[in-house]
């Protein structure tokens, strides 16, 4: 399993970083907004952050968190909702849905306010650790938007580098601010996964590496009581899956499910992680509970979300050799899929079913189709897996 995300793109799971709690109503409103956001209540989250802005118009964090809420809504509309979107080949240059002009304008207006206010605070007090934190967090949010919503990786590089430097400076000024370890650790981890030429370029640009240290920094942020703690926990799901530390990933997902029980996607994440770990029974159980929650949830679904659930559930049934039920779920996934890499993975599973039934010719036909779909959507992990299946079959 590979992780080929650009440095700026990796920050997306940590973009809505934290603020020091202040004893005022604005802080309570920000906390309420974060609670809503992690529970997938996007409109309620944005409303709470806008109330926080009204309560304290000079606070850059409220503007940044409101921008993050808009960004999250746009990601949801694009269907970038699970670790699967960030494992494997980078998909920054694939076709995207047209972004709502109103939401795009709202994001840029909010992030401009956050940048202006945080820069002003830092100019007034260059030794203020939190001022550096706010500048870095706002730039990180801007980098994430450019990389994930606009697909402009080069445009995301400059704000990403600024985010990294400002959070390094935060830690120099106040080593207790482990919330700043999240962005620094995440960027270091990204650099550590690059090939030698790109790693050298990243070092020359000012980014550090060291995978062990990087993971430790993200884990420290996940243990540090702050508003950034949930972001760090979500980030660890990605990294633990990348490192094949599936027990740690599932344990982290369990912690988040207890905190945010309305976030149905955590059950989908648990099922996908269990599949990677080779535990189809555990995956089936998590996905069945998640599907039940999905059926009772009247809130909007992400683009292609139904296909994600049906594909994962179908894959667990393939692994359990429940052919009839697996075929039904996989056909439903195909009908609902909006992305070629999902279609490719579904055809991979259909190929496995054909192999199990002894129909090698049909299996090869499914695998060839899977390979084509996965490659054109830059899903290298799927393509590699399919090539193995074409040679040796599935048993």
Image (tube, helix red, strand yellow):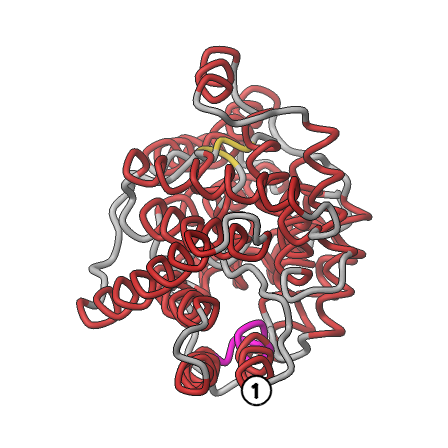
Of 157 and 149, nearer the camera is 157
**In the image, which residues are magenta?**
35-41
Circle 1 sits in a helix, a strand or a loop, which is it?
Answer: helix
> Dot 1, crowdedness within 10 Å: few (<14), some or many (≥20)?
few
Residue at the spot 51% in from the left edge and 43% down from the top edge: 166
Residue at the spot 40% in from the left edge and 30% down from the top edge: 368
Is residue 250 found left or right of 55 in the rendered image? right
Of 334 and 195, nearer the camera is 195
Of 20 and 318, nearer the camera is 20
Is residue 230 found left or right of 57 in the rendered image? right
Residue at the spot 53% in from the left edge and 83% down from the top edge: 26
Q: Which residue is mark 1?
A: 296
Residue at the spot 21% in from the left edge and 67% down from the top edge: 105
Q: Quadrant of residue 173?
A: top right
Q: Is residue 320 visible?
A: no
Q: Is residue 266 visible?
A: yes
In this view, 52 is above or below 156: below
Outermost residue, left direction? 101
Outermost residue, front direction? 124
Quarter of the image containing the C terminus? Answer: top right
């Amino acid at each position: 399993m590979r992780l080929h995300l650009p440095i700026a793109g990796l920050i997306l799971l940590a973009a809505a970083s934290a603020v020091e709690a202040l004893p005022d109503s604005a802080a309570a409103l920000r906390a309420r907004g974060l609670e809503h956001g992690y529970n997938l209540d996007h409109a309620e989250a944005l409303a709470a952050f806008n109330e926080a802005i009204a309560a304290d118009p000079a606070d850059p964090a409220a503007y940044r968190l409101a921008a993050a809420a808009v960004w999250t809504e746009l990601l949801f509309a694009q269907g970038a909702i699970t670790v699967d979107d960030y494992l494997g080949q980078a998909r920054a240059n694939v076709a995207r849905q047209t972004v709502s002009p109103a939401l795009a304008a709202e994001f840029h207006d909010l992030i401009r306010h956050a940048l202006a206010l945080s820069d002003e605070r830092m100019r007034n007090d260059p030794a203020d650790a939190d001022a550096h934190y706010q500048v870095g967090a706002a730039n990180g949010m801007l980098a994430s938007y450019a990389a994930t919503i606009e697909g402009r990786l080069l445009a995301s590089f400059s704000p990403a580098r600024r985010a990294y430097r400002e959070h390094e400076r935060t830690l120099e000024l106040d080593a207790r601010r482990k919330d700043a370890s999240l962005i620094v650790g995440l960027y270091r981890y990204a650099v550590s996964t690059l090939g030698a030429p790109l790693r050298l370029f990243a070092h020359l640009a000012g980014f550090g590496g060291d995978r062990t240290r990087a993971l430790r920094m993200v884990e420290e942020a996940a243990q540090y009581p702050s508003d950034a703690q949930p972001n760090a926990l979500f980030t660890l799901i990605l990294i633990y899956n990348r490192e094949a530390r599936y027990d740690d990933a599932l344990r982290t997902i369990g912690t988040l499910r207890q905190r945010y029980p309305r976030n149905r996607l955590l059950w989908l994440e648990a099922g996908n992680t269990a599949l990677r770990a080779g535990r189809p029974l555990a995956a089936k159980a998590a996905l069945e509970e998640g599907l039940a929650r999905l059926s009772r949830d009247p809130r909007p679904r992400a683009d292609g979300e139904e296909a994600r659930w049906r594909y994962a559930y179908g894959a667990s049934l393939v692994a359990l050799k429940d052919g009839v039920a697996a075929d039904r779920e996989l056909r439903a996934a195909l009908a609902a899929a909006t992305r070629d890499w999902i279609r490719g993975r579904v055809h991979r599973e259909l190929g496995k079913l054909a192999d199990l039934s002894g129909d090698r010719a049909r299996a090869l036909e499914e695998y060839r189709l899977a390979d084509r779909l996965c490659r054109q959507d830059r899903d290298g992990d799927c393509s590699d897996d399919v090539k193995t299946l074409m040679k040796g079959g599935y048993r």
